[in-house]
Amino acid sequence: MRKYILLLSGLLFIFAGSGTANAKSCTSERYGVSVDGKRARKNLRHLLLAGNLKGDKKRIFDQYGYTPHRLRFDHAGAKTERWRYYSEGLEFVFDEGSNLVDWRQIQKEDRLIQ
């Protein structure tokens, strides 16, 4: 009798383990995209930025495109963000509410190697 109980509990343990392993692989496929690698993380940040912009930031982004030259400043509680487009020679300054506060022309850089 003991043999049958041990055999039955062992089989139950084996089949229960394989059932939970299948559920884990199923949830990882269903609930998220895994991002592996530096390039994939960079592309994901770029896509999330474009989808979450609003106001003047969105207008500038649509007109000039993505810039890696973005800096955020916090001076005495006033938060601003500065975007530089070196190829066009422009700099834009935004406040917390994505409103354009200031813009100016900067020295244009030609990045073509000749």
Image (tube, helix red, strand yellow):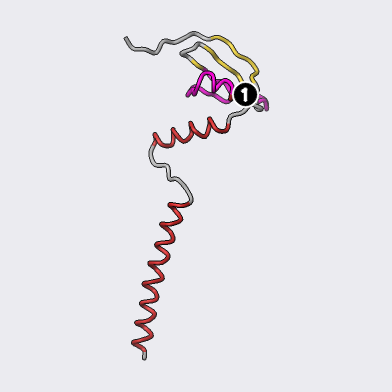
Q: The N terminus is located in which quarter?
A: bottom left
6 shown above or below 44:
below
Q: Residue at x 42, y 42 (%)?
A: 35
Q: Give the x, y percent position of residue 113.
A: 33, 12
| Mark 1 residue type | Thr
The question of residue 62 being in magenta is answered with yes
Name the one closer to the observer, 23 or 10. 23
For this orientation, the residue located farthest to the bottom is 1
- Whole-percent x, y for residue 9 in the image: 39, 79
Estimate the x, y position of residue 100 in percent, counting from the top left: 64, 19
* Residue depicted at 48% across the width and 31% down the height: 46
Position of residue 90 in the picture relative to residue 15 (left or right):
right
- The stretch of residues the image draws in magenta is 59-84
Q: Pinpoint residue 94: horizontal percent, then vertical percent.
A: 62, 22
Position of residue 31 relative to residue 104, above or below, is below
Residue 30 vertical position relative to residue 1 in the rendered view, above or below: above
* CA neighbours of label 1 inside 10 A, class few (<14), some (14 to 19), many (20+): some
Assess whether residue 70 is covered by the magenta stretch: yes
- The answer to which image quadrant residue 104 occupies is top right
Quadrant of the rendered image containing residue 93: top right
88 vs 19, left or right, is right
Q: Secondary structure at mark 1?
A: strand
At horizontal 59% and vertical 22% (from top left) the residue drawn is: 59
For disc 1, the marked residue is 80
